[in-house]
Amino acid sequence: QKEVEQNSGPLSVPEGAIASLNCTYSDRGSQSFFWYRQYSGKSPELIMSIYSNGDKEDGRFTAQLNKASQYVSLLIRDSQPSDSATYLCAVPVRGGGGADGLTFGKGTHLIIQP
Amino acid sequence: DAGITQSPRHKVTETGTPVTLRCHQTENHRYMYWYRQDPGHGLRLIHYSYGVKDTDKGEVSDGYSVSRSKTEDFLLTLESATSSQTSVYFCAATRDHSYEQYFGPGTRLTVT
């Protein structure tokens, strides 16, 4: 069973600063990586996907992937109180294009302090 | 929200009773999934479907069965509910092999 590890937090960041969320994964063969945001009492929402080494930027969000270190991170620039949520990292259960589901980390609880 | 709804949204049931949760989608997603989310465990895959009448087990499938008789509906059945199945259940779907899954609003199930 693949493992995805995240620091549970809470991670407290001042408003306007950069929030850095980290994730490590056990399967060196993983090819796809996803970040979900989940507000309390709500369902997870896909915010970023990354498939290649390096950085991928989308608005205030940047995903960073380092397959050699089996490490994926999410940076949130100009953090806003509305970014306060739990962030989930996920990788495919088996991969290979079978769409067989995702393995999730337990999530990092992020708090943006006004 | 990718056109995914779940019903019921909340349910309280007694140990030993059968329970069926429904996931309905309106956007012709081929792949559908059931997850449960529990404190300390995160989201865990129960079952998934890769087409009508095509399903397979996930990490925590014991005590659960699923059915998919048409593209838009994916049913999760607890044959005889136990207190350990108290959880929040999420349905998810994706159109293709991308693994970019979109989630329904969830069903909070309490087994007393």
Image: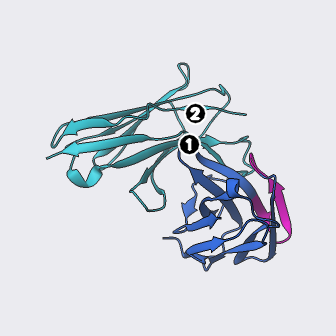
Circles 1 and 2: CB atoms closer than 8 Å: yes
Q: Quadrant of the C terminus of chain B?
A: bottom right
Identify the residue position indicated by label 1 in the image.
A90
Q: Position of residue B58 (x, y in %)?
A: 76, 50
Rendering quarter of residue B106: bottom right
Question: Is residue A22 on the magenta stretch?
Answer: no
**Residue at the far top in the pictured view:** A69
Q: Which residues are magenta?
A: B48-60
Mark 1: few, some, or many residues within 10 Å (few <14, many ≥20)?
A: many
Please state which amino acid type lies under the numbered disc 1.
Ala
Task: Write down the residue under mark 2.
Answer: A4
Q: Answer with left or right where residue A58 lies relative to residue A34.
A: left
Amino acid carrying label 2: it is Val
Chain to which the residue tagged by mark 2 belongs: A
Q: Secondary structure at mark 2?
A: strand
Rendering colour (chain A): cyan
Q: Residue B17 location in percent, x, y?
A: 78, 71
Q: Position of residue B35 (x, y in %)?
A: 64, 56
A77 on left or right of A107: left
Seen from the viewer's position, the closer of residues B84 and A22 is B84
Q: Is residue B56 found inside the magenta-colored segment of the image?
A: yes
Q: Residues within 10 Å of mark 2 (few under 14, many from 20)?
A: many
Q: Mark 1 vs mark 2: tell me if same chain.
A: yes
Q: Which residue is located at x 61 percent, y 65 percent?
A: B110
Q: Residue at x 73, y 40 (%)?
A: A94
- For mark 1, name the chain: A
Instruction: Kindly indicate which chain is depicted in blue in the rendered structure.
Output: B
Query: Where's residue B47, x and y in %?
Result: 75, 57
Residue A81 can be seen, yes or no: yes
Distance (Cα) linking label 1 and label 2? 7 Å
Question: Could you tell me what secondary structure mostly forms the magenta stretch?
Answer: strand
